[in-house]
Amino acid sequence: MGKIRKVFICSECGAESPKWFGKCPACESWNTCVEEVVSKDTQEDKQRVWQVAPSISNKGPIPIALTDIQSGTTNRIETPNQELNRVLGGGIVPGSLVLIGGQPGIGKSTLMLQIAMEVPARVLYVSGEESNEQIRMRAERIGTLREECYILTETNTSKILTHAQNLVPQLIIIDSIQTLASPNLDAISGSISQIRECTGELQRYAKETNVPIFIIGHITKEGSIAGPKLLEHIVDAVLQFEGDRHYTYRILRTLKNRFGSTDEMGIYEMQANGLREVSNPSELLLSQTDEALSGSAVAATMEGMRPMLIETQALVSTAVYGNPQRSATGFDLRRLSMLLAVLEKRCGFPFGQNDVFLNIAGGIRVDDPAIDLAIVSALISSLEDVAIPDKVCFAGEVGLSGEIRAVNRVEQRIQEADKLGFEQIFISKYNTKGLDPKRFNIQIFKLGKVEELYNMMFK
Ligand code: TYD
Ligand code: MG
């Protein structure tokens, strides 16, 4: 017989300790201690389990040749929501558990209710946060009501799963995991052990019945999904819904996906009647004025697998009060400082005496290094007060010695710029391998150093 034993585990790093701790002795994070019950087998017990095993094999799963397993990719549930399909890697996989994280008020409930109302299947939408009336009011606003969409306001997992068994839905949505509580545990809902237990129960249900389950999860101040990294390990896919609340764009990113690429992302726009899919983001993110203004440059970026043209704006003005200010929206401030230092050192621009403000259109956060070249151009353009002509865009990374470095998928970027009617694109000269300029109408300029950019554009 195994003996019951309790341990305390750090929910961040998984370190074990025999007694409670406030600060994890291994990773030094605070308040991450959770109590766990484990049963410890003695050496003899372990051996017995191993010897018994052969007789179990005719009940449980048995080893099966890879070639004999039927592929499960063909029966994905395609939703009418193309952006969601794209992010999931081509529709919802039966029996999968998908976690959707995001800050409060970003639109997670709206997105999920919209899916519940659109998917051509029987859906059970479980809400622990809103009442039936509130959900109905929201539903009326964002779409047409449908009979096959069931709403359940319940937080007890055992009751939820019993209802699910009776209703036999083809998709379950849980809003949110932090409100659920399992009767198997005494802990309050929202605690790490409850979140883990409830997710475990949902996962078992999903795997046994082959019903896909979407779980909404809130995000902590630090930006990780509240509760736990552990939760991210249990589920099959983790999607993150993000965006600046003051703008209307929302991005659905894949952080983890067992059934597809994590490079995909979906773009939505929050409107008065719910979320609208944005299938051509470039058009929204480009300037709304016709005249060319100084300090603005267009970058041909890639967000995941998708080319996107984004406008970057810089304002450089003489610093009046003491220390020059630097501020960046949608771009890493340290990277901006680095680009300024490169411009100062390599080309002698006096940015040190100027305030610098940088803004990426639409409140979108860009991590793609290829945006560097556009930012550098916008900075020089604002400093010199010379406008960059219309229909010109940039794609290149700027290195510390002022060299323009090659970027990935340059052909796709050029193609997108071409499609959108741009006439000139500036890329790195190291990026031209296998590139056939004759395929495009757009004129391609190749640069090796930042100085060349200055000479070509602003002299
Ligand atoms: P919600 O889905 O409740 O956010 P979450 O579940 O992530 O906390 O979205 C709330 C925000 O969305 C709220 O600020 C209002 C806005 N909204 C719209 O602009 N239009 C709409 O049609 C809906 C339903 C919400
Ligand atoms: Mg909500």
Image (spheres, rainbow, N blue to C red):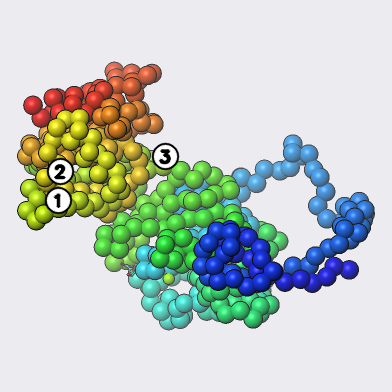
Dividing the picture into quadrants, the one containing residue 130 is bottom left
Q: CA distance from mark 1 to mark 2?
A: 7 Å
Q: Secondary structure at mark 1?
A: loop
The residue type indicated by label 1 comes to Pro
Coordinates of residue 435 in the picture (x, y in percent): 35, 20
Which of the numbered marks, if any, corresponds to residue 403? none
The residue type indicated by label 3 comes to Met
Pointers 1 and 2 in contact (C-beta within 8 Å): yes
Q: Which residue is mark 1?
A: 324
Give me the residue at 53% from left, 70% from top: 31
* In the image: residue 171, left or right of residue 145: right
- The image shows residue 447, relative to residue 243, as above or below, that is above
Q: CA distance from mark 3 to mark 1?
A: 38 Å
Rendering quadrant holding ligand 2: bottom left
Q: Which residue is mark 2?
A: 352
- The image shows residue 71, relative to residue 227, as above or below, that is above
